Amino acid sequence: MPHSDLSPPYGLVIFGVFLLVLAVIGTCIGEALGRFGQVVYRDEEPRQFWLLVAVQFLDGLGLIGYFLYKVYGL
């Protein structure tokens, strides 16, 4: 379904929530998804793990914030 001015871009909020859930689950189990589907473990590479979790979390918040801006003008 193409995006129009009549319907809000719900794909942004869905993908944003997905990224937030991915970051929380990754933090709990100690695994984060890296580029090209590789898995980064907290015990083996802590710096890259926390960087990936932070990027997922901030991207999720950014997409949800952009959705709220587009829909409600906040």
Image: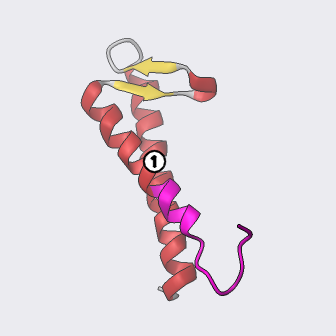
- Label 1 sits on a secondary structure element that is helix
Q: Which residues are magenta?
A: 1-16
Instruction: Count the marks.
Output: 1
Q: Position of residue 60 (x, y in %)?
A: 46, 55
State yes or no: residue 13 in magenta: yes
Q: Quadrant of residue 35?
A: top right
Is 32 on the left or on the right of 15, as rendered?
A: left
Point out the image quarter for the N terminus.
bottom right
* Nearer to us in this view, 13 or 7: 7
Q: Position of residue 52 (x, y in %)?
A: 47, 35
Q: Quadrant of residue 3?
A: bottom right
Q: Is residue 1 above or below residue 26?
A: below
In this view, which residue lies farthest toward the top?
A: 44
Residue type at mark 1: give it: Leu
Q: Position of residue 39 (x, y in %)?
A: 48, 20
Q: Residues within 10 Å of mark 1 (few under 14, many from 20)?
A: many
* Residue located at (38% from left, 41% from top): 23
State yes or no: residue 6 in magenta: yes
* Residue located at (36% from left, 46% from top): 21
* Residue located at (42% from left, 55% from top): 17
From the image, tell me which residue sits under label 1.
19
In this view, which residue lies farthest toward the left?
A: 28
Q: Is residue 73 above or below residue 32?
A: below
* Nearer to us in this view, 39 or 55: 39
